[in-house]
Image (cartoon, rainbow, N blue to C red):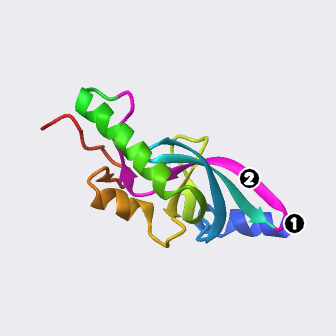
């Protein structure tokens, strides 16, 4: 064990290589928080599971407590849309740390094999998001 830590500390960049898990990791959606965050129980090992919040990678959906009525209405639509498509079993891929802590980021693949980010973007209920400034929802 000590050797592993020494390697991680001494080889530049290697410690960060372990900050990401490619998956797939099977999970069950327990609840939908909003259009871009779900709570899951992920099967991390044989007989071992972990309950965590997942920020859906690549999508920014409207906020439930948004700045205008349009944003709040779209937020409810996005949450309902995600809940209908992610009921039950999903797969998590490209799992990483969320910049705010307390949750992870991941691509969430529905039981039908579709990436929920692509589905949300196609429905007009999300903007593409790569971690920078978020686009607004209140302009007509």
Residue 60 belongs to the span the image colors magenta? yes
Name the outermost residue toward the right: 1
Mark 1 Cα within 10 Å, few/some/many (few <14, many 20+)? few
Q: Residue at x 28, y 26 (%)?
A: 67
Which stretch is magenta?
Answer: 46-65
Q: Which residue is mark 1?
A: 1
Q: Which mark is residue 50?
A: 2
Secondary structure beneath disc 1? loop
**As drawn, is 45 to the left or to the right of 121?**
right
Mark 2 Cα within 10 Å, few/some/many (few <14, many 20+)? few
Residue 90, image x, y percentages? 58, 63
On screen, 79 above or below 138?
A: below
Q: Considering the image in quadrants, where does the C terminus appear?
A: top left
Q: Which mark is residue 101?
A: none
Secondary structure beneath disc 2? strand
Q: Considering the image in quadrants, where does the N terminus appear?
A: bottom right
- Depth check: 26 or 89 in front? 89
CA separation in Å, label 1 and label 2: 24 Å
Residue 21 belongs to the span the image colors magenta? no
Viewer-side label of 1, 2: 2
On screen, 39 above or below 26?
A: above
Q: Are marks 1 and 2 in contact (CB under 8 Å)?
A: no
Q: Residue at x 39, y 57 (%)?
A: 58
Q: Residue at x 44, y 66 (%)?
A: 115
Name the outermost residue toward the left: 140
């Amino acid at each position: 064990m000590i050797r592993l830590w020494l390697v991680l500390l001494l080889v530049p960049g290697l410690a960060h290589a372990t900050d990401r898990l490619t998956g797939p990791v099977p999970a069950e959606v327990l609840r939908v928080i909003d259009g871009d965050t779900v709570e899951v129980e992920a099967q991390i090992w044989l007989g071992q599971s972990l309950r965590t919040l997942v920020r859906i990678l690549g999508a920014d959906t409207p906020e439930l407590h948004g700045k205008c009525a349009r944003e709040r209405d779209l937020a409810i639509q996005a949450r309902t849309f995600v809940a209908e498509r992610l009921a039950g079993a999903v797969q998590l891929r490209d799992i990483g740390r969320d910049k705010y802590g307390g949750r992870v980021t991941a691509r969430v693949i529905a039981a039908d094999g579709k990436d929920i980010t692509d589905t949300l973007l196609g429905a007009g209920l999300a903007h593409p998001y790569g971690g920078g400034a978020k686009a607004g929802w209140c302009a007509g």
